[in-house]
Amino acid sequence: MVLIQIVWKNLLRRKIRSVLTVIGIAVGIGAVVSLVSITDGFVHGWKNMIKGHGTDLTIVKAGTEANLLLNILDESLGDGLRQVPGLEAVTESLVDIATIEDKPSIMLFGYAAGGDYMNRLKFQTGGPITLDDKDEIILGSVLAKSLKIKVGDEIEVEREFMTVVGTCESSNVLENGAGIMSIKRLQKLMDREGKVTTFGIRLVNPSQMPEIKKEIETRFPSISALSTREFVDENEGVKMAQALSWGISLIVLLVGAIATMNTMFMSVFERTREIGILRALGWRKGRIINMIMQESIILSLCGGILGIFFGMGAVRMLNLFRQLRGLVQAEYTTFLFAEAIILALILGVLGGMLPAWRGSRMPPVEALRYE
């Protein structure tokens, strides 16, 4: 009988245990797929938002690791930046956290009224803020749905009432769940007059980015000029999300590896006499190892494929919750799916190595005596 046929026969003889092992691995792989895809979706959305603003370089305070809430710059720095050759536009923005209605932690973005960032927003209803001195606010689509607010309604922001003049749809989950005001009004509201979070720079010739980046950092040693990729990759929130997703995933994968190992150990234990017969018939140790490892790898491969669907299904389920609808965006890539399958195969190898080694080391005479 061909070895692969023996392997399948062994797995099908213990259907329930095999199915439970596959499900255990699938849960671990599903956790990886869902958490990593959500993190990747967040990063992808952030990049799209910055690109949508027409930003080539983002100016942050040196040493803040692109943490928006810790990054405080003087608004007057913009005048100095505008003197650097090769810059088409310099646009300031402010980010803060505030209470809106009964929601205690909502992000607020401050953009120049009538400016580039404000006019690039994609409005579902209403339109942009055009004057600095008005008590006006734009809501992201998710926040507007959550508050059940429409254009023309008044909402309370940090104990002050603002009129909703528009709702917008963004490629970034943060902007979808945030409020947008004129930067001057936000500075006054949060007592941060003369302060901004970042400056966005659009270049006349983007191919000159390295030279202009070096020129800016030479003129202003206290700041860093980051490309879109650098700004997103160095963002502390992104780093924390990536570390958290992989940390949780590795814990779940460890459980999956233990489950696989347990299944293969039980399989070897129950087939002690059978393995003894095979050894007595002339099967070499390597062939025994090959058989057990194939069983383990097949279980893990099935678990990996099922886990991909588990992970995608978990993301869909999260979007069914009203509080999370629109805030969970997943980015599925061929690389992520390949990563999931490779992790599943690694689980199979790790889970099968020790049981395979033990099975191959059984003395044929003692195995044949086993009842």
Image (spheres, rainbow, N blue to C red):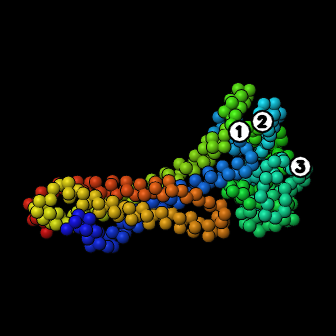
Amino acid type, residue under disc 1 in the picture: Pro
Q: Which residue is mark 1?
A: 206
Q: Amino acid at mark 2?
A: Leu
The residue nearer to you, when weighing 57 against 347, is: 57
Q: Disc 2 and disc 3: Cα gap in Å? A: 25 Å
Question: Which part of the image, by quadrant, shows the N terminus?
Answer: bottom left
218 or 73, which lies in front? 218
Residue at screen point 64% across, 64% down:
324
Residue 268, above or below 43: below
| 370 relative to 66, above or below | below
Report whether residue 337 is seen. Answer: yes
Residue type at tag 3: Asp
Determine the residue positioned at 11% across, 63% down.
281
Task: Examine the image and state in which quarter residue 205 appears.
Answer: top right
Which of the two labelled residues, at mark 1 and mark 3, occupies the earlier sequence position?
3
Q: Which residue is pictured at 15% across the width and 59% down the height?
A: 283
User: Within the image, what quadrant is residue 341 found in?
Assistant: bottom left
Mark 1 is surrounded, within 10 Å at the Cα level, by few (under 14), some (14 to 19) or many (20 or more) other residues, namely few
- Please give the label number shown on residue 87: 2
Question: Along the polypeptide, which appears first: circle 2 or circle 1?
Answer: 2
Q: Which residue is rendered at x = 89% and y = 49% of the image?
A: 132
- Decide: marks 1, 3 in contact (CB < 8 A)? no
Cα–Cα gap, marks 1 and 3: 31 Å
Tell me the quarter of the picture where residue 125 sits. bottom right
**In the drawing, what numbered circle is on residue 132?**
3
Regarding mark 2 in the picture, which secondary structure is present there? strand
